[in-house]
Image: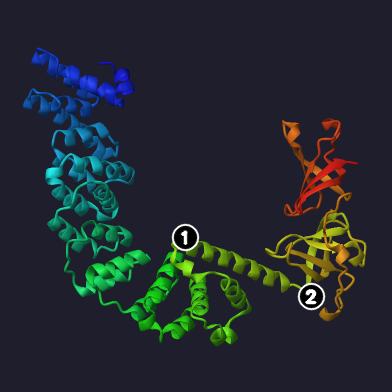
Amino acid sequence: MDQIIIDKYKSNPAWSEIVKIYSDLFDDSNQRNSFINEIGEIDTFIAAQCITSSFQTDLALEDEIIAKAELKLKEFKINGIIEPSAYYAMIELQKSENILGLFSNCKSNQLPFLKSSIQYLLDSNKNKSSIIVEEVIECNPSCYLKAINDYYFSANDLLDETTYKNISKKILIDPSIKPTHIINFLRLRIDVDLFIEEEILNAFLSRISDYNDIVFFISKFNVTFDLKNYLSKKTASSISIKECFMIFNLIRGNEQSYKHEIISFIEKIIKNTDQNLQILALILIIYYKKTNQFRSSLTTDQMATLLFLSTYDFEKFNDIDFFYSAIHTIKQKRTENISENKISSYYGKKIKTKVLSKWRYHYILNKIDDIGKPILLPFQETSELINIDDEINVIIIYVDKENQRLYASQRQINQETKQLYFDRRHINTIKIGDSIICKVEYIRNDIKNGIRLTPKGGGNGSIRCILDKSFQNIERLAKVEEFTVKKIINPSLVIVSQV
């Protein structure tokens, strides 16, 4: 039979059904066996289906197809070459024991296939599914437990009670398995009581990072929960936002027993360098109305975060999505505050920097560290003739926090900080009618979308210009040319026209 024809149609269920029906229409058993063997050379799974769908029984033929499948599976074991048809043929012919060894010490490129095959393996062996589950888990629980969970959550089938108990005891002491996967396995038989040593339960309890998981676990085993000790261990190092959510809700759910520990707990975590722990401390301060008690010990940044937090409805904090969104917003605000404080700290500082270029009414100076954009030196603040690439000494006389921009002066470099003066007319704002010298960045093939320009000396992409559609001739555009601002789209994007 033509290999190309087989490859083209074997994934089509209708075609495989036709092959199975056709294989059972031979009057001569030798011809039938020859046909199925020929199919088996190309696709052992379809050959196996021809055997199992037939009213005829031929153990010798079955052994031949099994031998073909075993030969192909040897390549799977040695070279990691996945041969799905051979794997599924073994399942079809009720020889699952021949493939269980593949789950042990498999290569990383084999894992996706093996995980995805578990459903078919269990569906085809319901009478011995418990044995298979135990063997697969024994091979590598951290790899296959989730696939086992997924199967039983979707199937109308219950895992055998004895198997459930045996596996539960093993996985609870296996640190390589994700706690969430273990919890989900325990959920498969909530009707079955498990008797596990308290030491094992407490050890596993400390690994849980999900609020719903820990509530289920405590309920499942009726664990005596020492919240103070648990939180002490959990907050000893950095934590995730998910763990923040869990801790916050655990404290809320145990307010009566933990109320005398709130202050000391906040005092401990507010000093931690981990940002999530600091934010959790601030959330607890607002929630339990302890602002006055902590006001004197909080930094300016922390007080600003508290003020922002006070705008939230804390009844919504029991929703994980809302909690995540709030934390990310708080982090963004804190980053902005830190950035503002950092750029503000440069006011009055004297620095040595390099002149990059000229732009409108300013010299463009090299920026400081990672602060915003290049420094601007207004022409009126110079005290000498300056050339591009000169290294000069200046003093920072103005901080534009909104635009993350520093303004400098040569003329005032010997002034004391309190005597520094800045003419706000020097703030770099674009107005309609302003002239800007730009270089052509690129010309789109479709000129109706405009020509992108970059202001010469604009620095760090602070503003972009697009040439309007009124230009007459693209060829007339020089590499650098003067343009006039015609329309302001936003502070960093303007439409310009040729002068």
- Contact flag, marks 2 and 1 (Cβ < 8 Å): no
Q: Is residue 159 left or right of residue 260?
A: left
Which image quadrant is residue 357 in? bottom right
Percent across and percent down for residue 174 are 25, 63
Amino acid residing under circle 1: Asp
Q: Which residue is drawn at 86% across and 31% down?
A: 472
Element on which disc 2 rests: loop
Left or right placement of residue 25 versus residue 431 in this view: left
The residue pinned by badge 2 equals 348
Nearest to the eye among marks 2 and 1: give it.
Answer: 1
Q: Is residue 300 above or below residue 434?
A: below
Residue 90 percent across, percent down from the top left:
17, 35
Q: Could you tell which of marks 2 and 1 lies nearer the N-terminus?
A: 1
Q: Position of residue 81 (x, y in %)?
A: 30, 36
Q: Residues within 10 Å of mark 1 (few under 14, many from 20)?
A: few
Image quarter (top left, top right, bottom left or bottom right) of the N terminus: top left
In the depicted structure, whether residue 149 falls above or below residue 294: above
Report, in whole angstroms, how far the alpha carbon at label 2 lies from the one at label 1: 44 Å
Above or below — where is 82 with respect to 156? above
Asked whether, in this view, residue 242 is left or right of residue 422, the answer is left
Which amino acid is tagged 2? Answer: Gly
Q: Nearer the viewer, residue 482 or 109?
A: 482
Q: Can residue 166 be seen in this view?
A: yes
Residue at the image position 47 percent from the left and 78 percent from the top: 269
- Residue 423 picture quarter: bottom right
Mark 1 lies on residue: 321
Callout 2: 10 Å neighbours few (<14), some, many (20+)? many
Q: Which residue is nearer to you in this view: 372 or 169?
A: 169
Front residue of 14/461: it is: 14
